[in-house]
Amino acid sequence: MKTILLPELSLSELNTEKKRRGALVSFYIATLVVMTVAGMMMTIRKGTTIFTFLPFVFLPIFFSIYKRYHDVKKEIKSRNDA
């Protein structure tokens, strides 16, 4: 995967990147909610299983994705303030 350097992107490209990463954050939130609900239901029905802890496994990935989204927002804000 190609690394995107935020300072090299134009403002319109940054806005596009913000929308793309925002959609990814929303998707991951929805996925984590579904996994949490499914894990709770499985725990109630069958006791503790691997599905109980599955949302916790994906949480660090979510934080990484959210940090990248926040970096894009911060770069846009710094350019608009300048």
Image: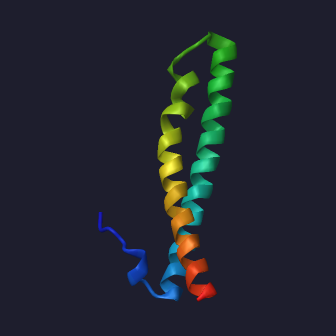
61 on left or right of 43: left
- Number of numbered markers: 0
Q: Is residue 9 above or below residue 72?
A: below
Q: State how the image is colored.
A: rainbow
80 relative to 33, above or below: below
Report the residue at 53% width, 40% height from top: 59
Q: Residue at x 62, y 11 (%)?
A: 46
Q: Is residue 13 above or below residue 1?
A: below
Q: Horizontal and vertical percent for residue 80?
A: 61, 86
Which residue does the image show at 51% across and 80% down from the upper left? 14
Query: Which image quarter is the C terminus in?
Result: bottom right
Is residue 46 or residue 33 the one in the foreground? 33
Q: Is residue 29 above or below residue 67?
A: above
> Of all residues shown, which one is farthest toward the top?
47
Question: Where residue 29 sits in the image (x, y, percent)?
Answer: 62, 48
- Image coords of residue 33 (percent x, y): 66, 40
Of the pair 77 and 13, the residue shown nearer to us: 77
Locate residue 51 relative to residue 5 in the image: left or right: right
